[in-house]
Image (cartoon, grey):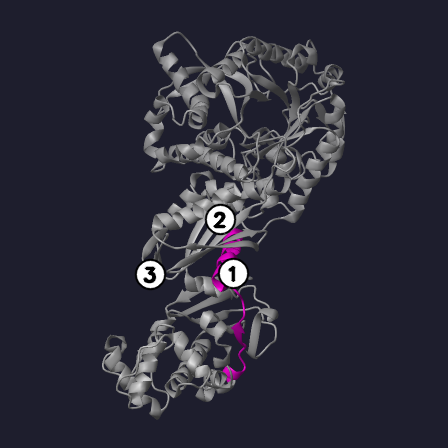
Amino acid sequence: MKYTRADFPKDFLFGVATSAYQIEGHAQGGAGQNHWDTFAASPGNVARGENGDLACDHLNRFPQDFDLVRDAGFDCYRFSTSWARVLPEGRGQVNQAGLDYYDRLADALLERNIRPCATLYHWELPSPLSDLGGWRNRDIAEWFADFTEVIMGRIGDRMYSVAPINEPWCVSWLSHFDGHHAPGLRDIRATARAMHHVLLAHGRAIESMRSLGMSNLGAVFNLEWAEPADDSPKARQAADLYDGIYNRFFLGGVFNKAYPDNVLKGLEPYLPSGWQNDFDTIGAPVDWCGLNYYTRKLIAPDDTAWPSLKEVPGPLPKTQMGWEIEPTALTRFLTRAKQEYTGDLPIYVTENGMASPERQQDEDRIDYLNQHLKAVQAALDEDVPVKGYFIWSLLDNYEWAFGYEKRFGLVDVDFETLERTPKASYNALKTVLTGGTVSLPLAQPAGAIRAHWNLVADIGGTNTRLGVVSDGKLTDLRKYPTGTLPELLEAFHSLRDEIGTDPRAVVAAGAGPVKDGTIQLTNAHLDLPERDIGRVTGAQHTYVINDFTAAAWSVAEISGDEVEVLQGATEPPTGTRLVVGPGTGLGVGALLYSEGRYHTASGEGGHVGLSPRHADEVEIFRAARHIAPDCFFDDSLTIEAEMFLSGTGLPILYRAAGMAAGLADTSVRSAREILEDARTNNDPIARRASHLFTTHLGAVMGDLAVAFMPIGGVFLVGGVAKKNRWLFKDAFRDAFNAGGRFSDLRRSMNLYVSEQDEFGIVGANNFCKSALAR
């Protein structure tokens, strides 16, 4: 080698790069199938039909490989994580073996004083997400953000640097327009959407990592210098368009929040609607820029559909890949990136190297590296803030559609025995890199990574309670006046600011219907959209739910210690659960248990019909017709259940009972006063009304239970139940069980009174956990 550490600035980093699918051995360790598995299994896509099932077996040999990195004197190791190894379905259930592997990998690097530089995605999409459209589907940006949270929540504290996506041009254009990489499409609409969505996913991942408190986050682009094949204006135009598609589209989106006009002329008709509104996310600030550079291309016009260009062979020396060697283009890229995109941001050459058939004496690779290090020095001389240089690659590996034929490694791999043998290039680098010192830290600052937290809300007409949830547990609960919509949103915002980071998710529960992401809060007389919650909190996921969706979810994790058992099992069994709660209204909800998890079904139980159960109740119902005629079903004596069985309805029942008893002027009293007088036997009318309340409520719950068949239990929840436990004894249970031929069935059901505090907050939290898990 012609250069040593002393030829570069202090703390200039030298590194070596790899990627997961190319070296790990994807068929091992519980990884799910990805689209390269199926692409390679399709004839004609990959040389000799080779795949990454075993690759270099890095999954089991990484300690040996990291010894090679350390012994060569490299400061950094750039690697990628496998989405399908961590989340085999792309979403949902985590493969703990996959997380454990990356955990051990991070520790092994730090033990050797090597800086871990992670790339979250290097081209291997989980097949179940490919089935849903993959990079054509806008939802992939959120799926990727969720994956980012999972993997960086585990190993982010030990990363020196992280970039979300390697080479967005390859992820989109090469794979969806040229069809050379998985998923192997050749479709301009798919291409345009993939190009936009890969940048949107990049931005969402940056936002996700910022919410964890991470720093030293970057973006990595592969660049090819485009030159016209001749001096004609058409060749110049073709080269400029190639430059726009390959280089400027992605750099411009991230750093300038704009796409080049010459590219939009062809792609804009196929971009997703509203694409212009995504640049604030795409352009989320990064801390550095990575450039992968290998070659230049000569471009000529072509008589085809847009982009109407083609590559033509050039005269320069070529690598085993057939790529021209043109190191001065690297200098031009570095200077142009600074001038037009990155400004003073640090720039890294995150990949540079060559494929060579020489398996031991690879003098051609040594010459290639020397030429490109000279190009880096030329950029440094022009005050470009180049901070590091990474060689592709440590090992000979799976070179995608070329299989195992093209060898980029500093270390030879015998793919029969998997034996590693350092090449001449490795030994040359070892001579010039070992013994140097770098003062930069190895990983994220101590204590910088913050645990995820969620915010849950129970919104009432007068007051709102906001709960802080960490690790699934409620750690803090605050009370705020509900007020107007701006006042309510300010409460969300102030709590977020006090904690200092954005919550991962917010769930707000309240009384009222939910439609199109907005809850109409009937008690508070305002509409609360999910988008407004997200705006003031910065949460990645926001949900508004009906109060009885929350009530149903409140019993999802309930234990025997949190209930009074009226009949049945002392510990609520797993299974569908029915929840009824008399409060301001009469709410009914259910958790339907299927495929190992709960699903919500909530309704307006207060609007089922209630009729006299005994002859001596007829006059009470007739009296109620005079008080609330609009709440009866036609000309019958059937009333909406909520008009008797709620905090709002009990005063109507009390007045009707008084009128039926011959009292012409029964005073208007609150539900609290009525129940207190009934409990203390101070008012016979209150006692009568309370008896009707508890027996009719028991009967309604029994009827609903027969319809739902909730083997997980029937639960009475809410403030009325908690504060008036004396109501729900023998008479209540007898009414629940009175079912004619089905009385024995009712008696066999598990019946409970919930004793949970803050069941709305508990339910919102349980809903949040389930939603995030999905």
Q: Is residue 381 shown above or below 14?
A: above
Q: Please, which residue is most extreme toward the bottom here?
A: 615
Which secondary structure lies at badge 3? loop
Q: Earlier in the sequence, mark 2 or mark 1?
A: 2
Question: Which residue is tagged 1?
Answer: 762
What amino acid type is highlighted by mark number 1? Val
- The image quarter containing residue 557 is bottom right
Q: Amino acid at mark 2?
A: Ala
**Quarter of the figure that contains the N terminus:** top right
Q: CA distance from mark 2 to mark 1?
A: 15 Å
The disc label shown at residue 522, or none: 3
Residue occupying the point 44% across, 49% down: 542
Per the image, label 1 sits on a secondary structure element best described as helix
The region drawn magenta spans 745-774
Does label 3 or label 1 sit earlier along the sequence? 3
How far apart marks 2 and 3 lie (CA) works out to: 24 Å
Question: Is 756 colored magenta in this rendering?
Answer: yes
